[in-house]
Image (tube, rainbow, N blue to C red):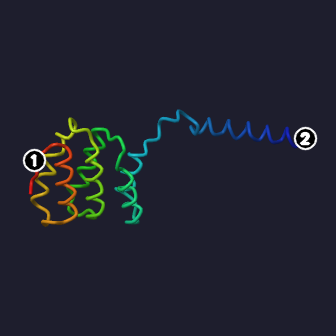
């Protein structure tokens, strides 16, 4: 068997195995936002979790993902940097979809220390999305 034939035979075998295991299936199944949310919830390394939170800014968020993010933001046991970064990411949501979280953010703003990064993020998001400034 020539070298070229072996290469093609091996390539065909690898491609077939990937298809059988599900790799190479519809490319639209990977959701980077959900992947980052899963990392935030489960990774032991705080810096990895913080990077994942930062990467959510500017991403399209589904209603379910917004709810997941709000659960993390409202959890006072979470890292404050992660919470603030998630609030910044929520600021990119279309104003007409902000009703599901703005009241909760306004309430949280009154519970966190004045001038904290979390409060600054909340006030900026409320202002951006057209809500009343809760200072």
Q: Quadrant of the C terminus?
A: bottom left
Residue at image location 85% in from the left, 40% down from the top? 4
Residue at image location 12% in from the left, 65% down from the top? 114
Mark 1 or mark 2: name the one nearer the start of the chain: 2
Give the residue at mark 1.
132
Cα separation, mark 1 vs mark 2, equals: 74 Å
Residue at image location 21% in from the left, 61% down from the top? 118
- Mark 2 falls on what kind of element? loop
In this picture, is 68 found above or below 120? above
Q: Residue furthest right?
A: 1
Q: Badge 2, how many Cα within 10 Å: few under 14, some, many 20+?
A: few
Q: Badge 1, how many Cα within 10 Å: few under 14, some, many 20+?
A: few
Q: Which mark is residue 124?
A: none
Q: Position of residue 34 (x, y in %)?
A: 38, 45
- Say which of 86 and 74 sits in front: 86
In this picture, is 107 found above or below 131? below
- Whether the residues at callouts 1 and 2 have beta carbons within 8 Å, the answer is no
- Mark 1 falls on what kind of element? loop
Q: Residue furthest top?
A: 26
In this picture, is 111 found above or below 2? below
Q: How many marks?
A: 2
Between disc 1 and disc 2, the foreground one is: 1
Q: Position of residue 98 (x, y in %)?
A: 20, 41
Q: Quadrant of the N terminus?
A: top right
Q: Position of residue 22 (x, y in %)?
A: 56, 37
- Say which of 132 and 3 sits in front: 132
Q: Position of residue 68 (x, y in %)?
A: 28, 47
Q: Is residue 84 left or right of residue 51?
A: left
Give the residue at mark 2.
2
């Amino acid at each position: 068997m020539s070298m070229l034939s072996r290469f093609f035979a091996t390539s065909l075998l690898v491609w077939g195995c990937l298809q059988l295991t599900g790799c190479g299936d519809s490319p639209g199944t990977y959701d980077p936002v959900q992947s980052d949310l899963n990392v935030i919830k489960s990774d032991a390394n705080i810096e990895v979790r913080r990077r994942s939170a930062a990467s959510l800014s500017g991403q399209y968020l589904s209603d379910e993902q917004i709810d997941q993010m709000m659960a993390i933001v409202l959890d006072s046991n979470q890292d404050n940097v992660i919470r603030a970064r998630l609030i910044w990411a929520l600021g990119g949501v279309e104003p007409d979809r902000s009703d599901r979280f703005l009241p909760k953010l306004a309430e949280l703003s009154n519970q966190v220390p004045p001038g904290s990064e979390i409060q600054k993020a909340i006030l900026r998001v409320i202002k951006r999305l057209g809500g009343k400034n809760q200072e």
